[in-house]
Image (cartoon, rainbow, N blue to C red):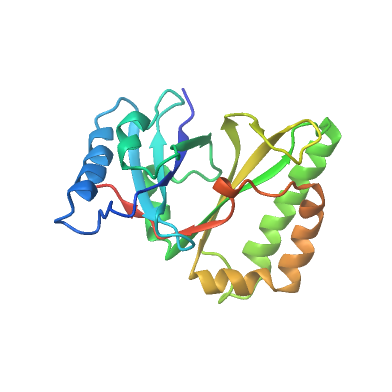
Amino acid sequence: MSQSVTEFVYLRLKSSVRPEDPSNAAGKEFLSILEQTKAQSGYNGSAWGRTHEDENSVIWMIDWADARGSCPASLLSPLLEAESAAISIYTSLHPPVSKTDLLTWNPVTEVCALAFPSSLSADERHTLMGHLAEFRGAVVQGLEACKAPVSWSMGQVERPGRMKHAESASGEAEFFLLVVGWKSVEAHMEAKETSRFLEAIAPIREMMLPPLPELGMKHVRFQKVD
């Protein structure tokens, strides 16, 4: 049986695209594309939202039955800012966000692709996986309730397996995607200042590369595509 995969599509919409306004023609077109995608084979569900950091930046998350599914990037192109394009990454999240309900229940969701050199040795990868597991435990179980996340999923970005990165010795990077629910953006910022968080993430930061701007930390209030 094929394992379900999650596609995260990063978009920069033109400022004239306002899906929230029922009278906005471009916004209606955007929502229509999301709706049409439901007819694709293997579609399990999806959700989208603007980022807290930039309202023209949108993340569309699509849950597929297997890796053959893909968003209709060509249909989205006319709605995007000039010289921008849809960026898609695929991962198998653990635990999965099946049918998007987990993300739409979160008050806000952090989506962050952590970049690491593609030249890591097998031993270094093993060490990294241990650090990531310890980080999850420290944040999920070690913070007081008012600062702790409400959900936590993570997965290695499987497609593309590598992306160009100017600060990697090999010229390429591999990524782990964090998808973490928080009570608010402020709660996340407060959690990041705690000693437990800082101590747990320190060994990961020592191995990390700077984030790619398009895939860096973003906060989204996802809404389900019904």
Q: Residue furthest front?
A: 82
Q: Is residue 177 left or right of residue 39?
A: right
Q: Position of residue 7 (x, y in %)?
A: 45, 37
Instruction: Using the image as rendered, state which of residue 117 and residue 184 is in the foreground.
Output: 117
Decide which of 161, 11 is in the foreground and name it. 11
Position in image of residue 184 (x %, y %): 48, 70
Examine the image and state in which quarter residue 165 appears. top right
Is 76 rendered above or below residue 110? above
Count of marks placed on residues: 0
Identify the residue at image location x=44%, y=58%: 51
The residue most toward the left is 23
Q: Position of residue 129 (x, y in %)?
A: 74, 43
Q: Residue at x 34, y 30 (%)?
A: 72
Q: Is residue 177 left or right of residue 206?
A: left
Going by the image, does 93 lie left or right of 224?
right
In the image, 49: left or right of 203?
Answer: left
Identify the residue at image location x=80%, y=47%: 207
The image shows residue 51, relative to residue 79, as above or below, that is below
Name the residue rendered at 31%, 37% in the picture: 78
Image position, residue 80 (x, y; %): 36, 43
Depth check, front residue: 156 or 218: 218
